Image: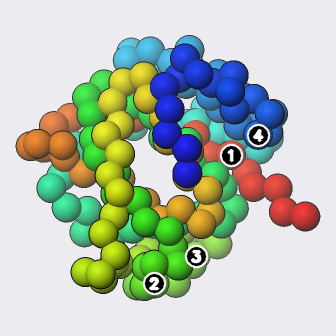
Amino acid sequence: MIYDHINNLNTYASLSPDILVGLEFLRDAKPDTENGVYQLNPRVKAIVSEYETKPQNENGYEAHRQYIDIQYILKGQERIACLPIEKLTETKPYSEEGDCALYSADTIHQPSYLSLQSGYFAIFFPQDGHMPSLSSASPEPVKKVVVKVMCVHD
């Protein structure tokens, strides 16, 4: 997992050209960017959406295998709970179609929380369980971009 400010995107240029494409899209995105799916190249797409944060995410933690998530807030703020998937219990098996498995946490392992607000991004790799859409104080509307970067498997 990586958490940083978009001004530092060049720090991550060497991770992969596709991650850089996603970060550059985020750098240039504005709060008035229209909701929808933006195909940035054959391996990278950005999904812009709006919703209201909530005190608890009933789906629990999620993790992906085919795509790396880069999450970025255009308006508002949210908290994201994070735990490595080896510390989570699978509650819904991995679906290739949705590229997602769902997980729950026990009370022994306490999550870390990211405060995602405008200008900051988080990159979640396949081993990173994450629970997005949580409210910081009380529920609030957010506009968010999730960039999906195809994983390259050797």
Residue plotted at (25% across, 69% down): 58
Residue 54: % across, % down? 18, 52
For badge 3, the amino acid type reads Ser
- Looking at the rendered image, the disc whose residue lies closer to the viewer, 3 or 1, is 1
Say if mark 1 contacts mark 2, CB within 8 Å.
no
Residue 4: % across, % down? 50, 32
Circle 4 residues within 10 Å: few <14, some 14–19, many ≥20: few
Q: Quadrant of the C terminus?
A: bottom right
| Element at label 1 | strand
Circle 3 residues within 10 Å: few <14, some 14–19, many ≥20: few
Tag 1 or tag 4, which sits nearer the N-term?
4
- Label 3: which residue? 95
- Label 1: which residue? 149
- Looking at the rendered image, the disc whose residue lies closer to the viewer, 4 or 1, is 4
- Looking at the rendered image, the disc whose residue lies closer to the viewer, 3 or 2, is 2
| Element at label 4 | loop
Specify whether 71 is left or right of 21: left
Specify whether 63 is left or right of 45: left
For badge 4, the amino acid type reads Leu
Image quadrant where residue 140 sits = top left
Tag 2 or tag 3, which sits nearer the N-term?
2
Say if mark 4 contacts mark 1, CB within 8 Å.
no
Circle 1 residues within 10 Å: few <14, some 14–19, many ≥20: many
**Viewer can see residue 36:** no
Q: How far apart are marks 1 and 2 (CA)?
A: 23 Å
- Label 2: which residue? 90
Q: Distance between the residues labelled 3 and 4?
A: 26 Å
**Tag of residue 15:** 4
Q: How far apart are marks 3 and 1 (CA)?
A: 17 Å
Tag 4 or tag 2, which sits nearer the N-term?
4
